[in-house]
Amino acid sequence: MTDELLVVRAQLGERDAFAGLVREWHEPVHAFVRRMLGPGAADDVAQEVWLAVVRGLPRLKDPARFAPWLFSIARRAVTNRLRAEYARPAAPGPGPEPDIGDAVVDRALVAAGLAGVPVLERELLILFYLQDLSLETCAEICGVPVGTVKSRLSRGRRLLRTSLAQKGHHA
């Protein structure tokens, strides 16, 4: 069953259809949130995302655009959490460590390097390369033109290379 059909059925109140959407999309959303915030906050923020989906699904006008809409909600939730963290006084110590336990070696290296990349570039690297979303979908999720996505990806790749090199890995 397609996501579009599941969305329409969920909008009509079918709980099994909504459960199907959660089964299909929970792990990609959770992975995005985990990579943006670290494993400590991922569960809470992913739960906030699904709560927002439950509340907003009846207002989704184009069921075919469910994935970009879902990741837009996830992005807002991540941004809200980051704002809250930045508003708190900084505590000494290292930042959140990326969760690389379930990744293959290359993805583990990338995840480790992502911690050294600024948020705007990191989110696009995750959406484009790790979630396999198109440039257009990434642009829609982030609310920026495709050209901005391309330039942030380029800068993000460069910063990721630098971050990996500082950790002793060579591209």
Image (cartoon, grey):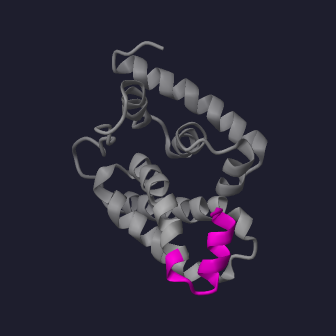
**Which x, y percent locates residue 22?**
48, 66
* Residue at the spot 51% in from the left edge and 41% down from the top edge: 122
Quadrant hosting residue 101? top left
Quadrant hosting residue 84? bottom left
* Residue at the spot 69% in from the left edge and 76% down from the top edge: 60
Front-most of 5 and 38? Answer: 5
Query: Is residue 58 shown left or right of residue 41?
Result: right
Q: Which residue lies furthest to the front in this view?
A: 1
| SS assignment for the magenta stretch, majority | helix
Front-most of 116 and 128? Answer: 128
Q: Is residue 10 above or below residue 96?
A: below
**Which x, y percent locates residue 8?**
67, 77
Query: Is residue 36 shown left or right of residue 148?
Result: left
Q: In this view, does 90 lie above or below 164?
A: below
The part of the chain drawn in magenta is 1-16
Q: Residue furthest bottom?
A: 13
* Residue at the spot 47% in from the left edge and 71% down from the top edge: 50
The answer to if 14 sits in the magenta stretch is yes
The answer to if 4 sits in the magenta stretch is yes
**Which x, y percent locates residue 159?**
52, 27
Q: Residue furthest top?
A: 170
